[in-house]
Image (tube, rainbow, N blue to C red):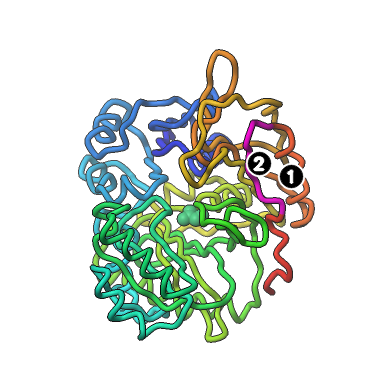
Amino acid sequence: MKVLVVGKGGREHAFTRALLSSPSVSQVYALPGSAGMGESVRLLAGPETPERLAEAHTEHAFDLVVVGPEVPLVNGVADRLREDGALVFGPDQQGAQLEGSKIFSKEFMEKYNVPTARFQVVTSLEQVKEFAPQFEPPYVLKADGLAGGKGVFICRTLDELLEAADQLFNDKILGEAGARALLEQFQPGYELSFFVLTNGTDFVSLPMAQDHKRLQDNDEGPNTGGMGTVAPMTIAPENHQAIIDQVVNPTVQGLASEGFVYRGVVFIGIMMTDEGPQVLEYNVRFGDPETQVLLPLLDGDWGEALKAIASGEVPSLNWKDAHAACVVLAAQNYPGTPVKGVAIEGSLADSENQYFLHAGTEKSSEGWLVNGGRVLNAIGMGDSLAQAIERAYEQSKKVKWPGLQKRTDIGKKSPQPK
Ligand code: GLY
């Protein structure tokens, strides 16, 4: 089978690696991909638009297209490719609105009784001032549109909230994506990343993963796309069942009732609170860096599993009795404007249980260079969580560059929720 992966980051490198080791897959392509994916992956020039992907499909006749990031899905690549008869892992444009518009997604949750924090739609600083007294600090302000991980403001005080609203609505720091927003009640608890593969009517759930979104240890510093992950994350069986009953079942029923062509993954950001699971957000693609720790846990063939979903079937999946950890190595100044073009010193050599995935690198005649905010993902696999973490950190020490940033406490949150 010839499989195309759309995208170029660490998540997509995790996909190409998993597909290269799938017996069902004979050739892996990536558009645009990255040199870090290795010479076995055939790179096709971007952009990740419906037109370019349709053209690439006409030329190469892929047996399966796996769409990594959300933007091409929100722009309708799955619809366009399906019109041409392609098998696509990823929802249609309507279904992708669950991530493309935070307001659409909240209205969907309300309609299908999926538990989530109470909210108010706001479109100006004046409205935020008007509605803020109905919420308690800390406040959450979320831009409606796609903002590349920069659209959520957690504000400890009213002053912080008003400043964020001023930036969003008056300074327009996120442009059209921030023209409307949600003012939402913050909910304390512990966060987890829950994934289901679905054909739009049935689903199979994956192991849970734990992300670390803040830049610095002890969950301090600015929010990022994710500085590291571990999987599987274990919680009490009754809590897992509550997520299935209260969140996943109504969500998948909603997908079916709305008539979306939803053949892909729903990545549900969940806050486990004293009142049970509350949905923070839906994503219509795999998480980054969650994918990096989930894919290596499958005891099976990812090519077959993704193709089954794209064909409208739900595969049964078996998981290894193993753990995975990912430590993100980020560029100087990330999550602000990263310092690029710096040489990566050291060895990128890998082994089965310890390896790098490339998130933002570039190959030059002199070697590898930093070319993004999140640069490399150090992955460790082990029989225990502790071993996986130890191996990921051991791997992370094999490279360096000026200003390299990484957390030293990935997977060490204590106590691990049970
Ligand atoms: N790691 C969070 C995300 O992919 O959105």
Q: Which residue is mark 1?
A: 393
* Mark 1 lies within 8 Å of ligand 1 (Cβ measured): no
Instruction: Establish if 102 lies above or below 4.
Output: below
Q: Is residue 243 left or right of residue 53?
A: right
Q: Which residue is mark 2?
A: 378
Query: Which secondary structure class fits the magenta region best?
Result: loop
Q: Residue at x 50, y 44 (%)?
A: 11
- Specify the segment rendered in magenta: 400-408
Q: Secondary structure at mark 1?
A: helix
Picture coordinates of residue 188, whole percent (x, y): 55, 77
Question: Circle 1: is it few (<14), some (14-19), or many (20+) Cα within 10 Å?
Answer: many
Picture coordinates of residue 111, whole percent (x, y): 29, 79
Instruction: Establish if 365 lies above or below 12.
Output: above
Q: Quadrant of residue 417?
A: bottom right
Q: Nearer the viewer, residue 42 or 34?
A: 34
Q: Is residue 294 left or right of residue 246?
A: right
State if disc 2 and disc 1 touch (CB < 8 Å). Answer: yes
Instruction: Establish if 372 lies above or below 192.
Output: above
Task: Name the amino acid type tagged 1.
Answer: Tyr
Picture coordinates of residue 76, whole percent (x, y): 25, 48
Q: Nearer the viewer, residue 324 or 378?
A: 378
Task: Name the amino acid type tagged 2.
Answer: Ala
Q: Secondary structure at mark 2?
A: strand
Which residue ends up furthest to the front in the rendered image? 159
